[in-house]
Image: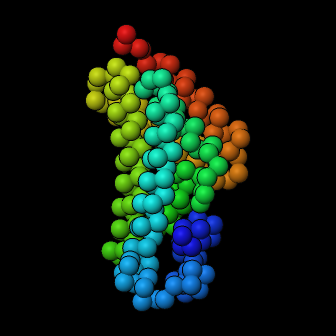
Amino acid sequence: MTATRLFSSDGIRAVGIDRILREAGVAKASLYNTYGSKDELVVAYLRSVGDRDRELWRRRADAAPDARGRVLALFDIVRERVEPAVPGSCHLAAAIEFPSPSSDGERAIRAAVAEQRDWIRGTLRSELAGMGLEDPDNITDLADRLAILHDGAVTATMLGEAATTAVTARSMAQLVLGLVSDPS
């Protein structure tokens, strides 16, 4: 999809509808009949990339031996070389571009960002519970810390530091997870 490529490479605000239409060879009426607005096109883009990221994780998680490996899979996918961009980066970029949403469309964009971030935290909470943690506050606290570590890995990867930072973040996550006792 042309919009996905352009939003990922040039930024959401920098890419206008006319450029998308021109490069995609699509009529304006067709775009507006399908999406209604640029903001809804952006929401569709974010959800599509989010679906892709979840599928990348699922493939890695299915191959993981246990819950600990499934948590680490979230860090592993940050190093995946996939189009349109590094897993997680499109959502962080959108959050940066729309720090204070002022319209319904911008709030919908931030909601799509929140959905992805909620999925990451929810996945972490679920897998931590699968590791034997029982205290909901402890699970939430540890999931939040791992999510921040994940955000840092994604951000550094966006800055071109994937080789070292993603590996370091994964190693730090592995260290933190090593502090969680195995229920068996």
Q: Residue at x 68, y 44 (%)?
A: 162
Q: Residue at x 47, y 66 (%)?
A: 45
- Vertical comparison of 129 with 154: above or below: above
Vertical order, 116 against 136 (above or below):
below
Q: Residue at x 35, y 68 (%)?
A: 108
The relative height of residue 71 versus residue 42 in the rendered view (above or below) is above
Q: Quadrant of residue 181?
A: top left
Quadrant in which residue 84 is drawn: bottom right
Res. 102 in view: no
Q: Is residue 178 left or right of residue 157?
A: left
Q: Position of residue 50 (x, y in %)?
A: 45, 54
Viewer-proximal residue among 181 and 3 = 3
Residue 41: x %, y % from top left: 43, 73
Q: Residue at x 62, y 45 (%)?
A: 80
Q: Position of residue 53 (x, y in %)?
A: 49, 49
In the image: residue 127, left or right of residue 149: left
